[in-house]
């Protein structure tokens, strides 16, 4: 059983790790996962990491390497907009929100102008929840009948904003006509009860 873990970092050199340097160590707390946070990094750069365990007898071999690029998150996808009564329910999916460092989602809306979005305006900001969720939702309410609205969403982390999702539109409509009506003839015309 290791007493702890030593972490090394290297800058990216054309897709491969450069010179390795020690960036810290973590004690073994006998948990299934050991976390390490490296605060000495810069945005828009790629870093390589490797780790080895140690105890009173010495060090293990290094683990396989991984690379991490510090960049804004990817755009949320897909964004769904579904009308219901006098509102449009919005849902975007991003199950890796916490792992991607996303801290919130920003929803925007625009009126419809001949089948295209008009001027975009802020709608709401939804913080990322812990434990992570697979989807994030918002209801744009108090809308008028036959109004068509466009929506888009972007995510944010400490580095900046993602690109916007593909815009989607929805129209507030009357409820659909019932598909069928059933009736039956009872055994008598008396009410029991």
Image: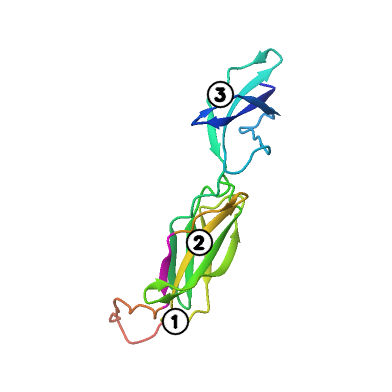
Foreground mark, 3 or 2, reads 2
| N-terminal-most mark, 2 or 1 | 2
Above or below residue 44? Residue 146 is below
| N-terminal-most mark, 3 or 2 | 3
Q: Residue 128 location in percent, x, y?
A: 60, 55
Q: Residue 4 location in percent, x, y?
A: 68, 24
Mark 3, residue position: 63
Report the Cα–Cα distance between label 2 and label 1. Answer: 55 Å
Mark 1, residue position: 193
Question: Is residue 171 rendered magenta in the image?
Answer: yes
Above or below residue 140? Residue 72 is above
- Circle 1 crowding by C-alpha within 10 Å: few under 14, some 14–19, many from 20: few
Residue at position x 60%, y 24% in the image: 19
Q: Nearer the viewer, residue 64 or 43?
A: 43
Question: Is residue 165 rendered magenta in the image?
Answer: no
- Circle 3 crowding by C-alpha within 10 Å: few under 14, some 14–19, many from 20: few
Q: Which mark is residue 169?
A: none
Q: Nearer the viewer, residue 31 or 163?
A: 163
Mark 1 secondary-structure assignment: loop
Please provide the residue range marked out in magenta. 166-172
Q: Nearer the viewer, residue 105 or 4?
A: 105
Report the Cα–Cα distance between label 1 and label 3. Answer: 75 Å
Q: Quadrant of the C terminus?
A: bottom left
Residue at position x 47%, y 82% in the image: 144
Mark 2, residue position: 153
């Amino acid at each position: 059983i290791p007493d702890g873990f030593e972490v090394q970092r290297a800058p990216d050199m054309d897709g491969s790790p450069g010179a390795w340097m020690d960036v810290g160590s973590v004690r073994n707390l006998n948990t299934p996962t050991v976390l390490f946070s490296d605060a000495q990094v810069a945005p828009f750069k790629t870093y390589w990491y490797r780790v080895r365990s140690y105890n009173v007898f010495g060090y293990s071999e290094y683990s396989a390497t991984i690379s991490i690029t510090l960049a804004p998150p990817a755009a949320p996808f897909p964004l769904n907009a579904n009308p219901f009564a006098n509102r449009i329910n919005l849902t975007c999916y991003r199950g890796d929100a916490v792992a991607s460092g996303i801290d919130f989602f920003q929803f925007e809306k625009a009126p419809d102008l001949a089948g295209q979005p008009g001027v975009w305006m802020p709608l709401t900001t939804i913080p990322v929840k812990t434990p992570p969720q697979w989807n994030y939702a918002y209801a744009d309410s108090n809308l008028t009948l036959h109004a068509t609205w466009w929506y888009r969403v972007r995510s944010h982390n400490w580095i900046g904003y993602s690109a916007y999702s593909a815009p989607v539109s929805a129209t507030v409509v009357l409820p659909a006509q019932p598909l069928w009506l059933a009736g039956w003839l009872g055994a008598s015309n008396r009410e029991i009860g």
